[in-house]
Image (spheres, helix red, strand yellow):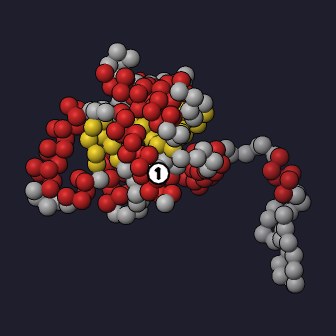
Amino acid sequence: MTRRTGHGPRPTAGRPEGSTTDQRLLDSRGDVGWVHTDPWRVMKMQAEFVEGFNDLAEIGPAISVFGSARIAVDHPAYDLGLRVGAGLADAGFAVITGGGPGAMEAANKGALEAGGQSIGLGIELPWEARLNDHLSFGLNFRYFFVRKMMFVKYSQGYIVLPGGLGTLDELFEAMTLAQTKKITQFPIVLMGTEHWSGLLDWMRGSMLDDARIKQSDLDMLTLTDDPDEAVALMVAARDRRRS
Ligand SMILES: C/C(=C\CNc1ncnc2c1ncn2[C@@H]1O[C@H](COP(=O)(O)O)[C@@H](O)[C@H]1O)CO
């Protein structure tokens, strides 16, 4: 669209003579290396934000569940994931995960089988990775930071099952956002006392004792083995938001 008012320069000033904008748009000849440049990547990032906002804005109250991509179905954490997913769905929450295998799959399966919304936000990885088979809705992202923002923006809290680096990244991002008051009223539950106790002991004995964090930073975490307690904490936080 071009708009002309007054006596300013013609809209075509500085553009190639003898062709229209549509003609240049439809002409596929020429250098295509620009698709691998940062200005074009910015457009792709923007497209991921647009698609994510568009598809997630109306999901209603949701909780993100994180955890290892590498646990098998017979691992105790898989069962925890199933029960957390089902409990959240029973409580009326949509369940959002990274959409991958392991603990993510367990939480999605639990939610879907309980009749809830089961959402997977997958990520392009250098190795083959696909969305698990227990989703009511899935999105695949190219950009990690765009995807990570979706978890925070569209959940009311995090439940974190035992995991590795990816899980720690998601946990500490939320803790940092809460510490800096970028997010408020955001419950974070760690599930699996055996898995998390060592980390929490180190945070208390090293980070807290050296005054690198405050007690209030640790107080934002609840540690439990009980899926019902984890879900009850999310329900209580939702009730507080509503009142
Ligand atoms: C390991 C394999 C596939 C990995 N696929 C993933 N798909 C989606 N999300 C993933 C994947 N891997 C990691 N994530 C994210 O990090 C968390 C788990 O990482 P961890 O290092 O295993 O703790 C998880 O919450 C995801 O959001 C092939 O089997």
Q: Secondary structure at mark 1?
A: helix
Three-letter amino acid code at the position of disc 1? Arg
Identify the residue at image location x=68%, y=45%. Answer: 31
Residue 129 to residue 5: above or below:
above
Residue sitting farthest toward the top: 74
| Ligand 1 sits in quadrant | top left
How many discs mark residues in the rendered view? 1
Camera sees residue 89: yes
Residue 140 to residue 25: above or below:
above
Tell whether 49 sits left or right of 228: right
Identify the residue at image location x=33%, y=25%. Answer: 77
Quadrant in the picture for the N terminus: bottom right
Question: Closest to the observer: 2 or 82?
Answer: 82
Identify the residue at image location x=32%, y=19%. Answer: 75
Question: Closest to the observer: 52 or 186?
Answer: 186
Crowd band around label 1 with a 10 angstrom C-alpha radius: few (<14), some (14–19), many (20+): some
Dividing the picture into quadrants, the one containing residue 169 is top left
Identify the residue at image location x=37%, y=23%. Answer: 78
Question: Closest to the observer: 40 or 116?
Answer: 116
Residue 93 to residue 85: above or below:
below
Tell whether 202 sits left or right of 160: left
Camera sees residue 96: no
Percent x, y for residue 46?
60, 53
Q: Which residue is mark 1?
A: 238
